Amino acid sequence: MPKSKVRKKSVYTPPAGVLPSRAAAARAAQPSPRWYAGVMVGLMILGLLWIVVYYVAGDQIPFMVSLGPWNFLVGFGAMVAGLVMSMRWR
């Protein structure tokens, strides 16, 4: 059986304005500072502990009693802040 011809494809080069500049690519690839991971994990743990303490002993802590159900916002807000930080962590 005869073999078919193999066509050579030309190398694709994108237009000049499509690729980001090298400076922007280098700036985006820099690793996070060492303290970033600690703050990120700390916020998530702090939010979890805030909610646990509110459930266990919230009626005995005066400022938690005055916050009432807003304690959930404080706890979940800290956890969400940690999760948002995890998306930016390199």
Image (cartoon, grey):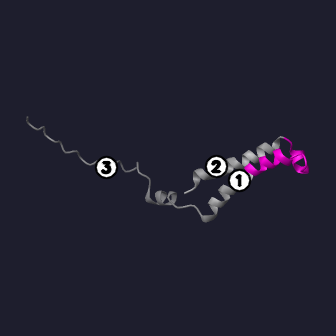
Name which residue type carries label 1: Ile
> Where is mark 3, residue-wise?
13
Q: Which residue is drawn at 66% across and 51% down?
A: 82
Q: On the image, which quarter does residue 42 sit in?
A: bottom right
Extent of the magenta region: 47-68
- The residues bearing labels 1 and 2 have C-alpha atoms spaced at a distance of 11 Å
> Taking 16 as reference, is 11 left or right?
left
Mark 1 or mark 2: whose residue is earlier in sequence: 1
Query: Eyeballing the image, is 65 above or below 90?
Result: above
Q: On the image, which quarter does residue 32 sit in?
A: bottom right
Do the CB atoms of the residues marked 3 and 2 lie less than 8 Å apart? no
The quarter of the image holding the N terminus is top left
> Where is mark 2, residue-wise?
83
Classify mark 2: helix, strand or loop: helix
Classify mark 3: helix, strand or loop: loop
In percent of width and height, residue 77 lies at 73, 46
